[in-house]
Image (tube, rainbow, N blue to C red):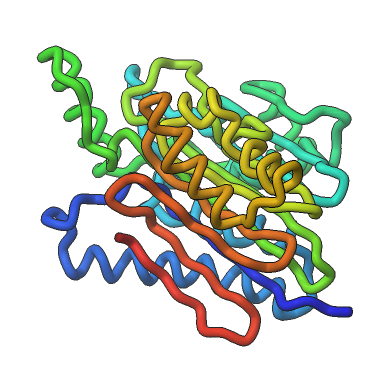
Amino acid sequence: MNKRYALAIHGGAGVLARDRMSDDLEAAYHAALSLAVQAGETVLRDGGTALDAVTQAVCALEDEPLFNAGRGAVFTADGGQEMDAAIMDGSGRRAGAVAGILGPRNPVRVARAVMERTRHVMLIGDGALCLAREAGLPFEDPPYFFTEARRRALDETLALVERGEIDDDPARRHGTVGAVARDRTGRLAAATSTGGMTGKRKGRVGDTPIVGAGTFADNDTCAISATGDGEAFMRCCAGHEIHARMRYTGRALADAAASVVSGDLPRYEGSGGLIAVGADGDIAMPFNCEGMYRGWVIEGENARTAIY
């Protein structure tokens, strides 16, 4: 029997503070989120798989310079760019991930190639780039990924470091995109992509490509895509922890997700949020910071987007 499809996306928990968000910029964020929801929903509405839906939705977010992934990726402390991504199929927990890459237009597609074309779960650096070329994925030159706003954010961050001050601006600390979906057959999938933290050390890898931390999917319970302080999400194994609470204690998706975001993450000085879809099609989108760029749709209902 067919089930109603469900899709949720996020553009990161690193939202601009309300007093810095102009009406025009807020409208631009809502429009970009709506396009990503539309990209994923089109797949589901046409009978496609959850895996294809999250791929298309994340590609749309990676192509949008407003978000910290793909074309809008932030800069490392040395002025470079290093991107991470992961994808997971709730059917059999197939997964693929990449870390520390620059060049492929859509890192999430490279992660999917790892899952579908190799026996591995994660590839990094040159190995991931080699696979992307073998798969015929499109590449872009470095100027494609440059945005003035991200360069300015790096300069501000480096100035704070030079003065010995702590960067407490979530717009610089956080930034990731992701999607989770359930298709009409009940299959779940999750995908996440990021440029990481502004001013991060070269070689730093966060929770995004870590299966069970920033990305997770199991058809029996839930699909998760996280955004925020990656080290905290890794330390509490956020995605798998939600799954475990649902599977072993019978907690509902919303309760399990909220308990991790509001209870576990703060223990590790972590802020951020996540999007989740359950096996029953329920959606949860908890966050413990000022906001999270997000959008969602359930079959038969109108799509919605939100920031704060």
Give the vertical position of 202 relative to 42 (above or below): above
Q: Residue at x 78, y 76 (%)?
A: 3
For residue 8, side relative to residue 109 (left or right):
left
Residue 144, percent across and down?
43, 44
Q: Which one is in front, 127 or 34?
A: 34
Looking at the rendering, in which quadrant would you find the C terminus? bottom left
The vertical placement of 154 against 192, above or below, is above
Residue 49 placement (x, y as % from top left): 78, 65
In the rendering, at what x and y percent does residue 118 appear? Answer: 86, 32
Residue 240 seen: yes
For residue 120, which quarter of the picture? top right
**Picture residue at 22% right of the left edge, 37% below the top:** 169
Q: In the image shown, does 304 or 53 lie closer to the viewer?
A: 304
How far across and how far down the image is residue 70, in percent? 49, 44
In this picture, residue 166 sits left or right of residue 256: left
Locate the N terminus by quadrant: bottom right
Residue lying furthest front: 249
User: How many numbered marks have been drawn onto this rendered protein structure?
Assistant: 0
Q: Is residue 144 visible?
A: no
Residue at 26 percent of width and 35 percent of height? 151
Residue depicted at 77% across the width and 48% down the height: 218
Taking 228 as reference, is 129 left or right?
Answer: right
Q: Quadrant of residue 277?
A: bottom right
Is residue 155 positioned above or below 307 on the image? above
